[in-house]
Amino acid sequence: MQNVECRMQNFFRSAYSAIVAPATKNVSSFFILHSSFLNRRQTNSGVALIMVLGLLTVMVLLAVTFAVSMRTERLAAGNYADTVRARELVQIGLARAMNDLAHNLGPTGLYQPGGKAYPSWNVTNSYYTNDVNGNARWNYTNAVIQKSATNYVPHILWTEATNVDRSTDLNPSNHWLPVESVTPPAPGLPNETNLMGRVAYIILNCSGLLDANYAGGAAGLGGGGTTRAGASNPNDIAIANLDEISDKESAFLIARSTNIRYETVAQLNTMGAFYAPATNLFVYSRALPGYWNTNPPIGVGTQVNLSGSVADLMVSERVAAITNAFTNIGFSAIEAGVLFSNMIDYVDEDSSPSSLEYCVESVPMINEIAISNRIEQITGGASPTYQSYADVDIEWWYPFVTSNSGTYQLQCTAANIVPVGPAGLLPSLSPPWSQPFTLAVNGMGVIHMPLNSPAAPSSDNSITFKATLSFDILRNGQTVDRVSSLEIISVSAPVGQVSWTNRECIDPRFNLNLNQWTNATGASVHSLGYTNAVTINWWNANPDYDVSPDMFASNINIRSVADMGYLVYAPWKTIKLYGTARNRVLDVFGLSTNASDIYITNTVYYGRVNCNTNLASNVTAVVFADMPVDKYPGEPSVHPLTMEQAHSVATNIFRGGICTNLSDIGRSLTNFPAGSTELEKESYFRNSMNLISIRQNMFTIIIEAQAASGGNIPKNPARQRAVAIVWRDPYTGEMFVRHIKWLGD
């Protein structure tokens, strides 16, 4: 019996240590009493009773402990399930936000009537909705932009974002959107709705911000000046003009090269090594080639590639593609052929025109031909004799802004002089005749060619003759300009006086076309060496076209599509890049990374700026800041645009409204703060278009989702927040999530 009691005592002590003691103090008191009772050696029935009571106590305690543990586990599992649901609801919130973008901007981009190339808002939010019964949902009880979410808002959008986030307006406003499961219980019965949670979001339009991973860094720093002619790389953007960069540009570029790539604005602000927070900077950009074609077939047009050498451009398939692109934007077939020929002359390394009928090669061109006619009495008496003195003056014009050194030869290739009316004294040309000369940049020159006539008796002291003249200008034995079979009728003045007959050319680039030549009204020797009156009259009558004679030929590959502004296609008509009469070359042509491509299909551009937002005016301004306003690349003594002038350019662009294509910038950009000549105005396009793209939209979406079991919202919900970067193609409406970051608070 004692052994039994000892074993029982040991059992209860073990149970007390393992289970009972941690659970309750009352059990400790029980075992003290029980131990005392056992020590008095109770009867067998008393021991059995105590054993039963002890076991029942242990079982009750085990049951209570299990129930508490299971309740804790159930609550923990429920909370975890709610957290998982909340995270899944974030994906629903992101899908709804992207659906809002598609609804607001057009799900198929510009294919949809009313589709937008750019949002009409800078910040928007989750739209207010009602349930199927018209009952309003919850208003906001807290803001989405709080805690770590604030680190993902570009500073320039901060005020507008917080105002929208805290708005209580109902249409639209910051309201929670319910996420419900709707199931029909049976045919004909009302749907059963199960509330799963709610979501809210803020959408920030970041399309007009600079890509911090690409902008700036040319020549070691921000680019600018003559080093950025053509602006072929986003490194040319002068980011030192941004307040957050300023004199920290070098540190910013070093930090960027060290960190390799910024994935979020929060990371940029932490590791960017500039004057944080980032105001005009973002972390991603992506622009596709192509343009929006408003001519049938309406849709995304494929750009024709202008990269490469003359040999690349002369491939037959590319010739057809280029000339077709010209006709597609309104040029005639003849004009398209002229433009292609002149483009080849612009690119090739020589200075020999491929066609003498029109010219963009830097050579002198015959611009005016004048004949002087004078009769002098040689002897008197009853039978006086007279002598004719006639001379030809040939004016050449070199309207190019760069030098093409060397010696040129003016040569009269044909001359035929016949009398008009009664035969009389006729001058004659003693062939062969030629005269060497050299050029002056953007200058003119006059070459004198004498005509000879013998002294002879005459019954008339006047003479009228018609001279048919042909001239060539040669360089190294090759003809670079020609005037053929130009007729001039000369009528002499009274004896001892000089008469002048001048034929002026409207546009010397087309001087082989005799329709370009006209008799000068009231001309005299003094018209030589000056701009022709017929040219000035043409300019006055056609102010929307070229009113400046300046020209330039590159003799290297095209660096910017805007280089085509140098190309002539008709008298005093070069390709126009701005104004209502602009030509859409910036749309239909592009520069591929592969010189052999006919069309641009696979190129993706990064770091380019969407210039549609006037909120981030500094971003558009720095595209033009430090840009040279020049007549040609590398022109010396050019003062680059100041930031103030660049702001004027940006304001001018914004004033014109949303740009759908690059050519729309020329529609808006018609006032130029610096530069007065045509080439200087076109430099605004030559030195910036490779830095701009319309075909990209970027959005930051901050989302919060809440879920709770049993629909316990808004009290004690499980929360999950995230920030996503979404890219959109304004032409097609295509969207994708570039990056998503879960927020831990």
Image: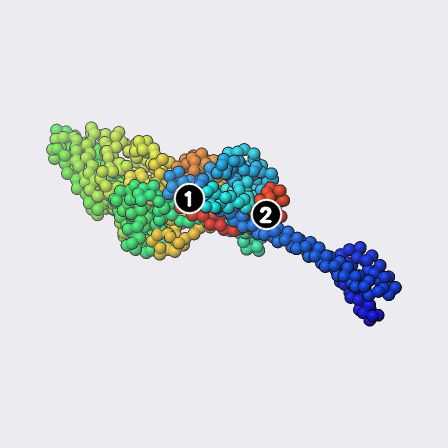
Indicate whether 224 appears above or below 120.
below
Q: Nearer the viewer, residue 438 or 181?
A: 181
Q: Which residue is mark 2?
A: 709
Q: Residue furthest right?
A: 40
Crowd around label 1: few <14 · some 14–19 · many ≥20 (10 Å) = many
Q: Residue at x 20, y 34 (%)?
A: 490
Crowd around label 2: few <14 · some 14–19 · many ≥20 (10 Å) = some
Q: Which circle's residue, 1 or 2, is located before the other in the chain?
A: 1
**How is the rendered protein coloured?**
rainbow
Q: Nearer the viewer, residue 591 or 207?
A: 207
On screen, residue 15 versus residue 699, left or right, reads right
Q: Position of residue 172 (x, y in %)?
A: 51, 35
On screen, residue 189 versus residue 339, left or right, reads right
User: Which amino acid type corresponds to the residue marked 1 in the rendered image?
Assistant: Pro
On screen, residue 289 versus residue 200, left or right, reads left
User: Which amino acid type corresponds to the residue marked 2 in the rendered image?
Assistant: Ser
Q: Nearer the viewer, residue 402 or 299?
A: 299
Q: Residue at x 49, y 36 (%)?
A: 133
